[in-house]
Image (spheres, grey):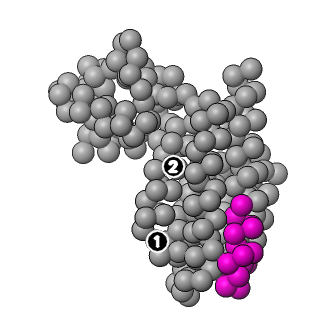
Amino acid sequence: MHYLRVKSDLLGGRFPPGTVLLETALGKIYGVSRTPMREALARLAQDRLIERSARGFVVRERSPEEILAIYEARIPLETTAAALAAERRGSVDLERLEHLLEARRAAQDPATHSALNEQFHRALRAAARSEVIASTLDQLDDLLTVYRPNRSSTKMVDRTIEEHEAVLDAVRAGNSQLATAAMSAHLTRMRDLRVASLVRRSG
């Protein structure tokens, strides 16, 4: 339970990359003793969300090389999920994906856009009917979430919506090859944007 609370706050941005996490300080925040907090931090370290430091643990700061490595794993899996979704999706899956896309078109704030983006990808994975792919991608999502690029501009959000529309059109048509190509193009662009943003911040 304590592990899930800290993980949720960590992925939600409460503890930005580089933040030192001390058992005693966190124990006061969450109202628990050091032992359960130590166990929670150890599990987060196993998840590669934090790492040991001289003072205890620190929230990991992703390097451009790490971002590239994560996407090397994510792109093949996510494109496979899109292809499988085109072959296996049902009417409820399509309705869910269309609803999420419409909600994102109407959304105004970056936080809502980000949440709907994640929900769209998760709904697509659910339509693929592959628990192994979905669970693996969830883990990769967590690794990427620890590093959050600067808030997206309206132009960037519009581009992402257009790319999601292309994926959904292919899934709706049952065209697995087109779904693969559309998802690959989308994720390749997002990878390059994340790496470029991280390079600018560290430069």
Within 10 Å of the Cα at label 1, are there few (<14), some (14-19), or many (20+) other Cα atoms? some
Q: Is residue 98 visible?
A: no
Within 10 Å of the Cα at label 2, are there few (<14), some (14-19), or many (20+) other Cα atoms? some
Label 2 sits on residue = 140
Q: Residue at x 71, y 85 (%)?
A: 173
Q: Is residue 191 above or below residue 26?
A: below
Residue 96 in percent (x, y) is at 56, 76
Label 1 sits on residue = 130
Please provide the residue range marked out in magenta.
Answer: 169-184
Q: Nearer the viewer, residue 123 or 99?
A: 123
| Number of numbered labels in the structure image | 2
Q: Nearer the viewer, residue 109 or 80?
A: 80
Quick check: 113 left or right of 42? right
Identity of the amino acid at label 1?
Answer: Ser
Provide the secondary structure element on which disc 2 rests: helix
Res 99 → quadrant: bottom right
Provide the secondary structure element on which disc 1 rests: loop
Q: Is residue 116 above or below residue 11?
A: below
Q: Residue at x 70, y 82 (%)?
A: 175
